Amino acid sequence: GAVVSQHPSRVICKSGTSVKIECRSLDFQATTMFWYRQFPKQSLMLMATSNEGSKATYEQGVEKDKFLINHASLTLSTLTVTSAHPEDSSFYICSAKGQDFYSNQPQHFGDGTRLSIL
Amino acid sequence: GENVEQHPSTLSVQEGDSAVIKCTYSDSASNYFPWYKQELGKGPQLIIDIRSNVGEKKDQRIAVTLNKTAKHFSLHITETQPEDSAVYFCASGGAYKLSFGAGTTVTVRA
């Protein structure tokens, strides 16, 4: 159980292109989804938190107009990197958690998207 | 915000030996402490978690201990196997989000 699917796994595109990454919870309803960025040999850096049906909450220093997040349903969130440039090249990972009013639910992660901007 | 420190950054053990990774956190309000294993090119996989109302939890060869007074928690892997080689992350948080440690690269020597 608790499977999170992330697509695509790898994207290579030209500078100026916008790239959309999908994150789906396959066997549970994800009331909250998270988007992280990970640089080589480093930890996960939280970019934003999204709750179904509401606007995403971005971490300090993350440009919301650059990284558009949509969480339109309980099983799908998307991250769009707009007008991507080489400095946006990174490993992007989503996670999802279900809702439990009495205890924290774990975050379950997708397998990430390797984004390379030429 | 929450600050999580993780040690060591790298750990090499002989197959069959134990591995211990330690983390400290700063926010006394944190009440949830998961551990993740990340293999190369993959996303982190939850391997065990502990909540603040217990001091220890075990799942086969993996155990986690929590000391809320000292604000530290540890991961113990016994009888290590080559497939345990990976990067391990501790995390600390509450109802909304997690803060992650810097990671420990574990190498199990055959």
Image (spheres, coloured by chain):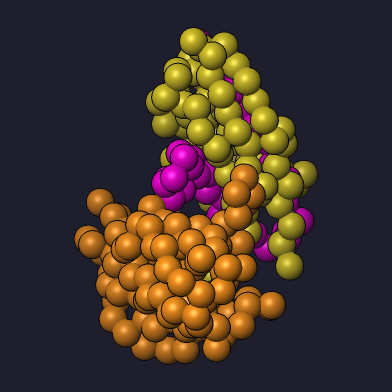
The residue at the point 29 percent across, 67 percent down is A24
Q: Quadrant of residue A78?
A: bottom left
- Residue B73 drawn at (x, y percent): 65, 40
A79 with respect to B75 (left or right): left
Q: Which residues are magenta?
A: B16-45
- State how many labels appear: 0
Q: Colour of chain B?
A: yellow
Q: Is residue B78 above or below residue A77?
A: above
What percent of the width, then of the height, locates residue A53?
36, 88
| Chain that appears orange | A
Q: Residue, x 56% and y 24% (percent of image)?
A: B107
Q: Is residue B20 magenta?
A: yes
Figure check: A95 above or below A47: above
Q: Residue at x 48, y 15 (%)?
A: B79
Q: Nearer the viewer, residue A96 or A5?
A: A5
Q: Nearer the viewer, residue A90 or A72?
A: A90
Task: Please tell me in which quadrant of the rendered image residue A22 appears.
Answer: bottom left
Apparent side of residue A81 relative to residue A24 in the rendered image (left or right): right
Q: Is residue B7 above or below residue A16?
A: above
Q: Is residue A17 visible?
A: yes
Can you name the residue that lies furthest to the left here? A27
**What residue is shown at x 62% (from left), y 68% (from top)?**
A87
Q: Is residue A19 magenta?
A: no
Q: Nearer the viewer, residue A46 or B78?
A: A46
Residue B46 x, y percent position in the rendering: 43, 46
Image location (x, y in percent) of residue B28: 72, 59
In this view of the protein, can residue A97 be seen by the observer? no
